[in-house]
Image (cartoon, grey):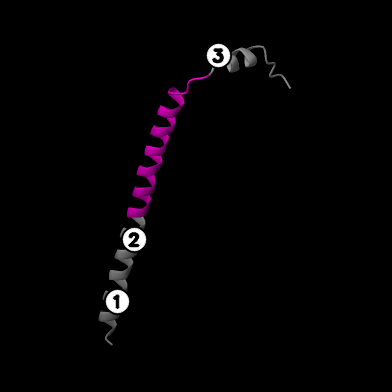
Amino acid sequence: MDITLLSLILLLSFIVALSSIIYAFKHLDETRKGDIKNSIQNKQNIKYDSKFLKSVKGLDLNL
């Protein structure tokens, strides 16, 4: 094979690999942002039982 053909194939494979890595990091970042948003919403919607709140009210956390 010609050296130019080999270099063209190598360059093409490098571009494909680089674009797939960039896509993977973007996808990872989007899912992480979604997970953080969902966890914040879940923390705001937590309802505690009044018996539990009364039992932990006098708890001393100084260990």
* Residue type beneath disc 1: Ser
Q: Mark 3 points at which residue?
A: 50
Give the residue at mark 1: 7
- On screen, residue 57 versus residue 19, left or right, reads right
Q: Earlier in the sequence, mark 3 or mark 1?
A: 1
Name the amino acid type tagged 2: Leu
Residue 38 position, x and y percent, is 40, 33
Label 2, label 3: how many angstroms apart (C-alpha)? 55 Å
SS label for mark 3: helix
Q: Which residue is drawn at 36% across and 57% down?
A: 21
Q: Nearer the viewer, mark 3 or mark 1?
A: 3
Point 25% across, 80% down: residue: 5
Determine the residue positioned at 59% across, 15% down: 51
Question: Which segment is the magenta one?
Answer: 23-48
What's the magenta bit mostly, secondary-structure-wise? Answer: helix
Identify the residue shown where x is 26% and y is 75%. 8
Residue marked by disc 2? 18
